Image: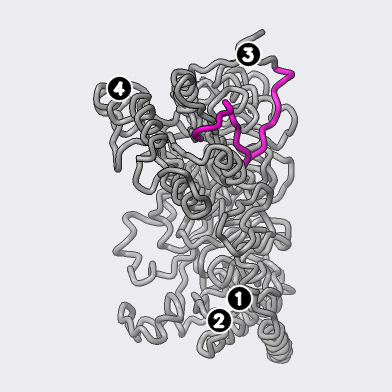
Amino acid sequence: MPLLSYLRAINRAIGDEMSRDPAVFIMGEDIREALTGTTVGLLGRFGPDRVVETPLSEQGVTNFATGAALAGLRPVVEYQIPFLLLLVIEQIANQANKVSVMSGGQASVPVTYLLPAAGWRPAWGGQHSDQPYSVFGHFGVKTVLPATPDDAYGLMISAIRDDDPVVVFAPIGAHAVRCDVVADDLRPVPLGVGRVHRPGTDVTLLATGHLVHDALAVARELANEVSIEVFDPRTLYPFDWHGLFTSLAKTGRLVVLDDANRYCGLAAEIIATVCEERHLLTMPRRVTRPDGAVVGCVPELDVALQPSRAELVAAIRLTLSGG
Amino acid sequence: MDKMQAPDLYRVMRLIRRFEERAIELVRSGEIASGIHPCIGQEAIAAGLGAALRRDDVLFAGHRAHGHLLAKGTKPGALLAEMAGRVNGVARGRGGSFHPSDFGVGVYGCTGTVGHGAPMAAGAAWALARRGTDRVAVSVFGDGAVNQGALLESLNLAALWQAPVIFVCENNGYATTLPAERGIAGSVPARALACGIPAASHDGMDPETVHGAAAAAVARARRGGGPAFLEFRTYRFEGHHTFELTAGLRYRSAAEIAGWRARDPLVLQGSRVPADVRSGIDADVEEVIEEAVRFAVAGNRPSPAEAMDYLYAAAPRPSRPGTLIEVR
């Protein structure tokens, strides 16, 4: 069976949607040369009017896409560095995402914002390695974080088809993941629906992005000790509370594994909501980057700042012991 | 300028003037909670520009936009209701005075982030051209916007891709309280000229001058000639916002205001219209305004249960545990 890579899946999703819908186009920096890998082959298939190479003008380009969307197109905008999405948080959260409500439902902005390289890559510097996705959920922007190639394909398709702005974070840590799937079996993945990667009965291990694969490895490693259910929300906002509560109804215990900074991060929101809504058997735990962590300066330090399997094992054991 | 259009321009300007004066009264009486950014003194630009546009052309404006909506064809009652937060407003009250939109007449939005409508207009114009239409898009902003990075970026993008967009700077001399000469290095048109966009400065107190410049730019963009940049020198007779009615700011002298009031564009255009025609228009406008006020204040205020409506165009919508208000 052919192996589908993560970035190839995103590339295929963009190409498939551009074939299906002439309103879809992609714009971004260096996309003619497919610098990030997501636009390989698209220039030849669709031409420069639909593979729109932009100068380095992220704020202008993001609002440009809003205008193009209001005039009937469905832009995909690519950004190369995580913090560039915070350079344009105003354009996404305060402009594009508010059109629907501020127009009283007259219009909406079907733009997909694609970050093909979320998180850490060794030695890429302290300004290139962040995970700013929690901010978008805070402002109510639909946000997805696919962990696998088939989910990357399916969520990318759904993001492009959605009539609201959607941010797609593709974690660098998942780029090496391949999955056995033939093209005909690829399907859209609905936004807002999580995925149980591994069923279990003792503890729900909620993992996001590339950390889903660490969660699965730890679940296998501890299989003789504890039955771990690995739950991936896939969409960070709107969150699949129903899916998580269904899992917790079985396990009664929760550990959250997330690559974002701890303070006001995604894991904090998940644990707060679970504590408000459900009685757990033991205290929930989270494994995250530290508060306010700056990752990317020195590889040895970077590894220490990111969630590790050892920390995860410790958190799971702590949760099981009720400590 | 066709002589037939002189009364039409006057009618639009008179409508805008009386609309804003009446709106200020409604601010004072509490019907419009936000206050407004009155465009009194700047009516010539809205009227002249509006007369150069088709209903299906696209317009993005900023916080001082009532005049532009009226000139584009928005119904005065629906706009006033919008400003008063009523559900019969043009955007169901969700845009208010600051962020109204009326997609039916091509007003796609009014952003409060100064200057950031310019790249939206460029993007809309580019998309309209790519879709094979001859529609154009216009971005209206003040002098405060010309130092915003996003606006400057949009000039470059529009020129690179020859988008049919017209950038219109209403230079009223002040970015809130900052005088233009303390905020703008070089000239306003030079910013566009640097990108190869035709740009010039015009008298914004004469609606026929505005119309001539705007019509030429629109015609050029419509036939594929690319973007244009128009600076119109103007003045707002009132404060930046109605909070100045009580704030007692002193950034403008009484003599300066009086000097510009002596150049009232409504008086100028009125002088081009026979007196009997003018008084007929004035009487018509009074009726329109009174009907608009009746329509606005009769509108229902939204129910708190609707507070999360329209947040999203499409499913999935968040269903928040513990939240009492349903997201629709």
**Most frequent secondary structure within the magenta stretch:** loop
Left or right of residue B78: residue A10: left
Q: Where is residue A266 in the image (x, y as percent from the top left)?
A: 44, 43
Residue assigned mark 2: B32
In the picture, the quarter occupied by the C terminus of chain A is top left
Mark in the foreground, 2 or 4: 4
Q: Are marks 1 and 3 on the same chain?
A: no
Q: How is the image coloured?
A: one colour
Span colored in magenta: A183-203
Residue located beneath label 1 in the image? B85
The local secondary structure at tag 4 comes to loop
Q: Which residue is the site of mark 3? A: A180
In the picture provided, is B274 more to the left or to the right than B40?
A: right
Q: Distance between the residues labelled 2 and 3?
A: 61 Å
Element type where label 1 sits in the image: loop
- Say if mark 2 contacts mark 1, CB within 8 Å: yes
Q: Do labels 2 and 3 share a chain?
A: no
**Residue underneath mark 4:** A123
Instruction: Give, as a three-letter code, the residue at label 1.
Output: Gly
Tell us which disc is closer to us: 4 or 3: 3
